Amino acid sequence: MEEQGQVKAYAEADFSEPHNRFIELISNYLDPNFSGKALDLGCGPGDICFRFAQKYPECTIDAVDGSKPMLDYGNKRLTPELARQINFICARIPFNTALPGSYDVIFSNSLLHHLSDPQMLWQTIKACSKTRTSIFIMDLLRPESEFIANQMVDEYAANEPDILKHDFFHSLLAAFTLDEIKLQLSYAQLDLAVEQIADWHVFITGKLQ
Ligand SMILES: C[S@@+](CC[C@H](N)C(=O)[O-])C[C@H]1O[C@@H](n2cnc3c(N)ncnc32)[C@H](O)[C@@H]1O
């Protein structure tokens, strides 16, 4: 996501409900004193990694996105405290150079449906992890029809700018079903739990063996 209007609409939208939900789900699995190294894949303007950093003030986060305009928003919002924890990195997945080190936690929200090949996400996770790395992924689920996608836009994004409604509609159509995600994971040989957590959200978690 590079276009200024699109990035501005996304960065200024209020995603506190789904993002807090994501952090809450993560906290069901993660040690409350987690102080390791986390990786946020497709971090966008950084809202989720800010929330994660506040919840786990002793951790550090590499937050990666392929869009510089998105990261510019993230960098502008960094407070001195958060800057000690979060390192924004501009890079596209699949990475052509390895990120430094392997991570204790990898999380990602709403990236999977953006990738031309979903294996890019699963293989990147494998490449950046080690034994017992905790994985937390959240994404949209594809509704059964364009008609339902339109209804969801009307229900959940009624007061958002048109550009955000347009992106939400197309993101819903680009998203995967539960069965498709399970197949992707099986192909990648990743033993992760896949759970539908709302009409239009899936949560994928587990520890790498
Ligand atoms: C819908 S936004 C989600 C942002 C953030 N995770 C959040 O939940 O607010 C998707 C993000 O993925 C990024 N993205 C898409 N394809 C990418 C790729 N191949 N490599 C890195 N980032 C990518 C986009 O630039 C965008 O910031």
Image: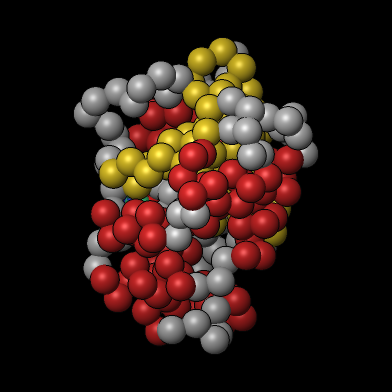
**Residue under the image location 40 percent in, 47 percent down:** 42
Quarter containing the N terminus = bottom left
Colour pattern: secondary structure
**Residue under the image location 34 percent in, 47 percent down:** 65
All told, the count of numbered labels is: 0
**Residue under the image location 56 percent in, 71 percent down:** 14
In this rendering, the answer to whether 20 lies above or below 93 is below
Q: Is residue 74 left or right of residue 140?
A: left
Q: Is residue 30 left or right of residue 120?
A: right
Give the residue furthest to the front.
80
| Residue 59 vs residue 40, the one in the foreground | 59
In this rendering, the answer to whether 112 lies above or below 153 is above
Which quadrant would residue 118 be assigned to in this image? top left
Q: Is residue 27 visible?
A: yes
Q: Is residue 12 left or right of residue 208?
A: left
Image coords of residue 201 (percent x, y): 61, 56
In this rendering, the answer to whether 63 lies above or below 60 is below
Q: Is residue 174 visible?
A: no
| Residue 90 vs residue 205, the one in the foreground | 90
Quarter containing the C terminus = top right
Image coords of residue 70 (percent x, y): 34, 59
Which quadrant would residue 101 be assigned to in this image? top left
Image coords of residue 68 (percent x, y): 26, 54
**Residue under the image location 50 percent in, 82 percent down:** 160
Image coords of residue 55 (percent x, y): 68, 45
